[in-house]
Image (tube, helix red, strand yellow):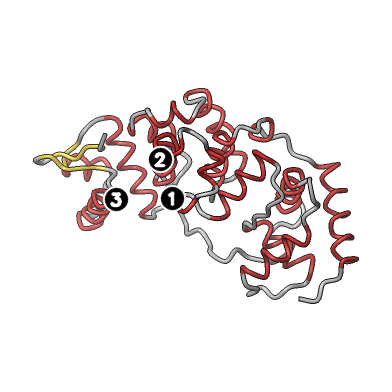
Amino acid sequence: MEISDITISKFQRKVWAFYRTHRRRLPWRTTHDPYKILVSELMLQQTQVSRVITFYNKWIQQWPTIQDLAHASRREVLQAWMGLGYNTRALRLQQAAKTIVGDYQGDVVQAMRQYQEIPGVGRYTSQAVLIFATNADLVTVDTNIRRIFIHEFGLPKDISERNLWDLALRCLPTGRSRDWHNALMDYGALHDTALTTGVKPKTRQGRFEGSNRQLRAQVIRLLLQQDRSFTELQKRLDVPKVKLQHILATLIEEDFISRKKNRYLLKD
């Protein structure tokens, strides 16, 4: 990619100018606690910021430390997550907490440096936690940042991840990683949106209404209330027998629920 230092400097000035005027006040930006930042990062995956704020505040009030979360019950964790979607994220977050407490003595920063060992944490999330918690001179590239770079630098939409991360590193202002990534997030969310740029995500979230995701959430919500038989679930949900059987089998395989005799229940 032939992008000059002058072009990058102009881009940086544009982003900083926007950030000075349009900076968002978000609860996870008021802390450098890596645990709280990890919670926010996993909640924000495929979920709108406005919806996450309430869930995040309640979550941190209920489990203010990673040790608190590691020792919570699965039922409590799922109950607190209901409404955010993709409930597997809740269990992965707690599994991550248990691993970090058990193997890293609760040291989230050290665990993020070994993110391959942490359930539900990939390169983007680990780098983001290190950036926002420690202001490390690192970069991370999510859907928003990818869209910004493609639009602002006129890049091909099929640009490789390696080239994007290399460009991100060239754009990084040394010593200001935390503010820079917050600025990029706001620029992508409020200025270079998918609508204004025409740059679509590499993967798109399917429709929720009537989907298997919706049915999974409904099953979990019912089982949070009490154990139920297949007949009870089918009557409450009013879905075809084969479809419900498939959902229940998947939830059992993913270790969400179990079956005892003729009743389904959440696993502890």
Q: Choose mark 2 or mark 3, whichever is in front.
A: 2
Which residue in the protein does label 1 denote? Answer: 117
Which residue type carries mark 2? Thr
As drawn, the residue found furthest toward the top would be 61
Q: Which of the two discs, 3 and 1, sits closer to the camera?
A: 1
Front-most of residues 79 and 146:
146
Question: Which residue in the protein does label 3 denote?
Answer: 254
Name the quarter where the C terminus is drawn. top left
Q: How many marks?
A: 3
**Quadrant of the rendered structure where residue 144 is?**
bottom right
Compared across the picture, whether 257 is left or right of 147 comes to left
* Residue 132 on image: x %, y %: 66, 41
**Mark 1 in CB contact with mark 2 (< 8 angstroms):** yes
Q: Residues within 10 Å of mark 3 (few under 14, many from 20)?
A: few
Crowd around label 2: few <14 · some 14–19 · many ≥20 (10 Å): some
- At x 60% / y 43%, what residue is drawn? 129
At mark 2, the secondary structure is helix
Marker disc for residue 99? 2
Q: Which residue: 56% across, 40% down?
A: 109
Labelled pair 3, 1 in contact (Cβ < 8 Å): no
Q: Is residue 197 above or below residue 137?
A: below
Q: Earlier in the sequence, mark 2 or mark 3?
A: 2
**CA–CA distance in space, label 1 to label 2:** 8 Å
Type of the residue with mark 1:
Glu
Label 2 vs label 3: CA separation? 19 Å
